[in-house]
Amino acid sequence: MERFEIKKIEKFNNYFSALIKDNNENINFWIDCSLIDGYGNHNNFVDNDLYIDWEFNQYIFHLENENDIKAKKYQENADNIDCLQDFIDENNEKLVNILK
C-alpha cells in the first residue's frame, strides 16, 4: 500500500485543495495546490514546465485540542514534509493537469 493517497479534490479558479491520507501515520489533511513554473512564478509563466506549489490548509488554533496537536506535530516533522513532497513530485503531471 502506498504511503499517501488522494482522497478528494476540490477545484477552484486558480488552485485546488486535496484531501490526502498518510497511511503510515493514519492522518488525513488538506493541502492547497497551485501552479508554478521552474522559476517559481505563479502568474506569467516563463517556461512550459509547470509544477505544483503546495501548503497545508489547516489552521491550528487550540494546542489543548488533540486533533490540532496531532496536526501541528505532523506538519513540523521534516520527514513527513519530504515524503509528501516526493509524492507530489511523482504525481506532478497528474496534479498539474487538474488545473490546466
Image: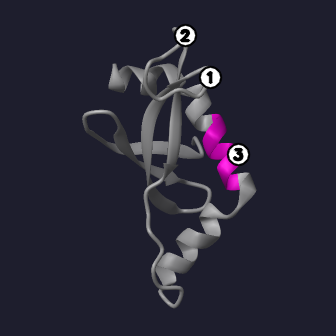
Does the magenta run of residues contain 43? no
How far apart marks 2 and 3 lie (CA) works out to 25 Å
As helix, strand or loop, the secondary structure at mark 2 comes to loop
**Magenta stretch prevailing secondary structure:** helix
Circles 2 and 1 in contact, beta carbons < 8 Å: yes
Q: Nearer the viewer, mark 2 or mark 3?
A: 2
As helix, strand or loop, the secondary structure at mark 1 comes to loop
Q: Which mark is residue 82?
A: 3
How far apart marks 2 and 1 lie (CA) works out to 8 Å
- Farthest residue toward the top? 48
- Farthest residue toward the bottom? 64
Give the mark nearer the N terminus: 2 vs 3.
Answer: 2
Residue at (53%, 13%) from the top-left corner? 46
Q: Amino acid at mark 2?
A: Asp
Residue in the foreground of this view, choosing between 25 and 67: 67
The residue pinned by badge 1 equals 39
Residue at (48%, 52%) from the top-left corner? 21
Q: Report the span colored magenta.
A: 80-86
As helix, strand or loop, the secondary structure at mark 3 comes to helix
Quadrant of the rendering where the C terminus is positioned: top left
Residue at (49%, 19%) from the top-left corner? 93
Q: Nearer the viewer, mark 1 or mark 3?
A: 1
The residue pinned by badge 2 equals 47
Residue in the foreground of this view, choosing between 42 and 87: 42
